[in-house]
């Protein structure tokens, strides 16, 4: 916060609040535009590393949901049909 903002807050708090609100609105509008000063943040890890860190927790949550919620059971069954196939995996001799 600069000298101008501090002075405005002391003299006219309403004006300072409106100014800050307008600044936040402008920043929110421009937040998606990468520029020289606002670079897009990149993830330092690979996707495999990120999933590996939370893999056990995700597995346990998915297993619990599959055992206890009818909607999730139906969702997993439909996903299995779409990915693997309605007749399952067949081993051909």
Image: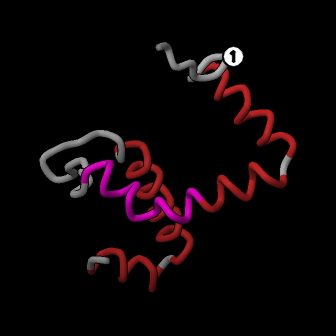
Residue 3: percent from left, percent from top:
27, 80
| Image quadrant where residue 8 sits | bottom left
Is residue 8 shown above or below 68?
A: below
> Residue 92 vs residue 23: left or right?
right
Residue drawn 83% across the image and 40% down it: 71
> Residue 12 vs residue 4: left or right?
right
Residue drawn 65% across the image and 28% down it: 79
Observer-nearest of 15 and 20: 20
> Residue 24 vs residue 63: left or right?
left
Q: Dot 1 corresponds to which residue? A: 86
For this orientation, the residue located farthest to the bottom is 10
Residue 92: percent from left, percent from top:
49, 13
Q: Name the secondary structure under disc 1.
A: loop
Observer-nearest of 46 and 38: 46
Observer-nearest of 41 and 33: 41
Q: Quadrant of the N terminus?
A: bottom left
Residue 7: percent from left, percent from top:
36, 82
Q: Residues within 10 Å of mark 1 (few under 14, many from 20)?
A: few
Write the start and end of the magenta stretch as one range: 46-59
Residue drawn 52% across the image and 69% down it: 17
User: Overall secondary structure of the magenta stretch?
Assistant: helix
Residue 89 is a magenta residue: no
Observer-nearest of 28 and 20: 28
Is residue 29 shown above or below 13?
A: above
């Amino acid at each position: 916060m600069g000298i101008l903002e501090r002075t405005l807050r002391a003299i006219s708090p309403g004006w300072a609040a409106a100014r800050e609100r307008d600044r936040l609105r402008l920043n929110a509008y421009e937040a998606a535009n990468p520029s020289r000063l606002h670079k897009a943040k990149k993830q330092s890890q690979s996707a495999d590393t990120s999933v590996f860190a939370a893999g056990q927790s995700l597995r346990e949550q998915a297993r619990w949901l599959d055992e206890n919620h009818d909607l999730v059971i139906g969702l997993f069954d439909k996903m299995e049909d779409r990915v693997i196939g309605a007749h399952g995996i067949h081993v051909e001799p």
